[in-house]
Amino acid sequence: MRTVLYSALICLIGLLAGVSCQKNESAGSVTLSWELVSNFTPVPNGFEARFDLTNTGDTPLTDRNWALFFNMSPRPMLKPRSPQPGTVQHINGDWYKLTPNAGFRLDPGATVTIRYEGTEGVAKVTDAPLGPYMVLYDDAGREEQIVPIANYTVRPFVRNEQRLRGSADHEPPYSPEGVFRQNQTATLLPAAQLQRVIPAPVRLSTSSGTLALSASMPIYAGPGLAGEAALLAEKLKQMTGKTFQTVTTPPTGPAIVLKTGPVQVAGKSREAYQLRIQAEGVSITGSDAAGVFYGTQSLLALLPLEAYKAPDQPVALPFTEIDDAPRFGFRGLHLDVSRNFQTKETILRVLDLLAFYKVNQFLFYTTEDEGWRLEIDGLPELTQVGAQRQHTSGKEAPALHPAYGSGPKANEEGKYGSGFYTKADFIEILKYAHARHIRVIPELNFPGHARAAIKAMEARYQRLMKEGKPAEAAEYRLIDPADRSVYQSAQGYKDNVVSVGLESTYRFYEKVVDEVTRMYKQAGVPMEVMHIGGDEVPEGAWTQSPVAAKLLRENPAIKDPKNLQAYFVRTLLKRLEPRQLEIHGWEEVALTKAANGAYVPNREFVGRRVVPYIWNNLFDPDLGNRLANAGYPVVLCNVSNFYFDLAYNNDPEEPGLYWAGYVDTRSNWTFAPNDMFKTTYKTAMGDPLDFTGRERLRPDARPNIRGVEAQLWSETVKGRDMAEYYMLPKLMGFAESAWAPERPWETIDDRAARERAIAAGWNVFANTLAQRDLPRLARLNGGYNYRLSPPGARIQNGLLEANVELPGLQIRYTTDGLEPNSTSALYQKPVRVSGPVKLKSFDAAGRASRATVLTPP
């Protein structure tokens, strides 16, 4: 009965989309499997894969009546070396189509193998085709029925030709033995040697004596600090179970006192604080309200783990003195909610994390090719069309096609392609962040990465033209309809660039900015910054556009279509400057293209409140230095250190991207902003980086490093748990680089000596994560889904040896094939085994890692 109802529902969806239904409910029923065959092909950096398709229905599949649609990380397709029953073709973005070749026939019960080839090696299970579904066609070639594929499997990556990205990949294949070797430098430290607070304060000292933190101690809020006091009381209750009263009259007995006053630490007087824990109570004095707030977060960090485990027990705090201020004034997290949507509740949980680790900027990435996520008054199509993805008949349809496995149906449960924030949602997020001293930076990425906006405004155009309103229809149109330019963006899009020669493009941008500004005003929050994106405009854009050609004729100084991106930034800047906004954008906003197409610094916007964000420290290693030396205030977003969406390692089962290599928590922690060459040693493929002839950061340009930002792009991020897994514990390593004072190893020139100092410092940080900060996250805000790294292990002469990346984690193992749990055998020293072994890391909160599987040689 449930099958019949489900089929009826699919039929109804098809009817609503203008697609009829077959009476035969088993038509198009298939079993599908996918396998990566090899990354070692005759084509350099190529791959070969295969689909195995079994017809489980009772109707033959022919060369005319079906096609398979799916998403796959964008990769150009190649002509197969041998004839195949079907052909995989790229449609747009990460949307692909498998169609049968002439003569194809698959009878009920039969199986067919279809191989295909492409470029860029595939090394992760998360790269496998996502969200496959069938479309059935009638005899006239019209779409007749959409059939989801429920029985789909991805075969494991077990061979080296699957686990390496090809002959150019010089990273060793992932193995438990390799992890064991890496972990051998880690040693277990006693609690007394752990870092007391993450990120590390400028100065921290303790003395003999303890303060019993008691709910009888009120929290005194000095003038203007009622919000900070209320948030502290809320967190203390959450963490300790005790209810603390807030008062505005100076107390006479022991208390937690919050006040502002003259505070300067390490030459900084913004966001600075002094924290004192003494017999008479706790005193937090901040240079401003933000400083007070960060003092409260350090107080919460000082609470022992036992306070979370047993909230009814007294909390004893050692007498402590902290003097602290941030290294950088800009400490940011970028979160992309366009590729895959995240709920408002998830955003609020992220903001709590940022506040606790003293991150004060949140770049809210709500517009992209794959989704527009913010309600805008007067432009309903932005969310009606731009905030949902569904099957379309082609890329020309006024709708967003499936992406990243979102499937053929909009708003499907368990998918993340559809969704948006209402104005009320956004205002709530703004208020929530502001209370925690986090600035939310809105973003509208133009002129590239704009497909969702383009499709939405085309739908608006068509609607108003049908209503007989041509002037209104053209008011916010974003494309030149006669543009025949051929290009393909970095993410595989062929239609994601707006026309920079249309007045309506700039009117649209101003309209969005003004509506977003109104939401900030309603939230009572100042809007000071607009992030304009400005990145990755593909070669070929605007080359066949009559509107662009006219613009070039009228402005001969532009010379070439590739310079129209700088023209767009120049024009947009003039329009936004009267709104008193500082303009942030990716590095291209401060670059121009030389005759050979290479990017070079464009000094035109120096001094114009333009702040470029620099991610490219691998393919153009000194770009950040060159722009800072040119006078730009820059935010460092180094891909080799701060891209949370890059996988922790090259284990095929570890989710994430790797186009710029692999980024783990240590990568986030190991960062020297004044000499980035000291902490980036190899390319994305594991080859040594050569900095010969590269420009170094001049000492006088160091103040131009505005700060640092971590990025979480969401191509492979499905839902809250995955987002938190990608962020944690990387966020802690990033926070240390953003806030803590310069580490001693940052100024050591000798590489061997520097590496020894880095290893010693990292060992302390790793112990702190394992023994204190990660178990706390299991209880904070109801618990976060942080990652625990699987154990390293090896078997030599029948003896199992195992270790962990983060000392303080326990290792438990089984030899009976079952998954290890909290009662499984505890590994304490080498033990003799005779068969396959499974091991997991466990922390003090009982959380476990993924299993390591080891088979004796």
Image (cartoon, rainbow, N blue to C red):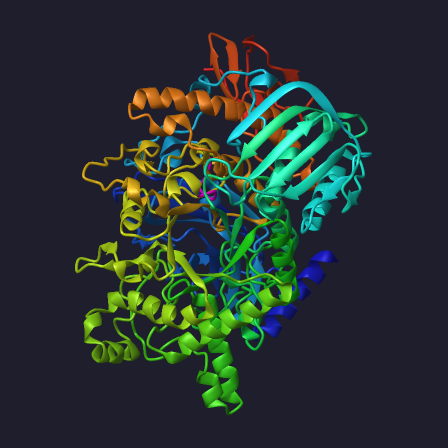
Judged left or right of residue 313, residue 412 is left
Task: State the image quarter where residue 94 is shown.
Answer: bottom left
Instruction: Give me the residue at 33% from left, 34% from top.
Output: 680
**Total numbered badges shown on the rendered structure:** 0
Q: What is the span of residues highlighted in magenta in the rendered image? A: 643-648
Q: Residue 27 in the image: x percent, y percent?
A: 58, 61
Q: Residue 620 in the image: x percent, y percent?
A: 27, 46
Above or below 596: residue 218: above
Instruction: Give me the residue at 43% from left, 34% from top.
Output: 667
Q: Confirm whether residue 644 shows in the render.
A: yes
Task: State the image quarter where residue 341 is shown.
Answer: bottom right
Q: Residue 681 in the image: x percent, y percent?
A: 31, 32
Q: Residue 214 in the image: x percent, y percent?
A: 79, 31
Q: Confirm whether residue 142 shows in the render.
A: no
Judged left or right of residue 499, residue 126 is right
Above or below 674: residue 484: below
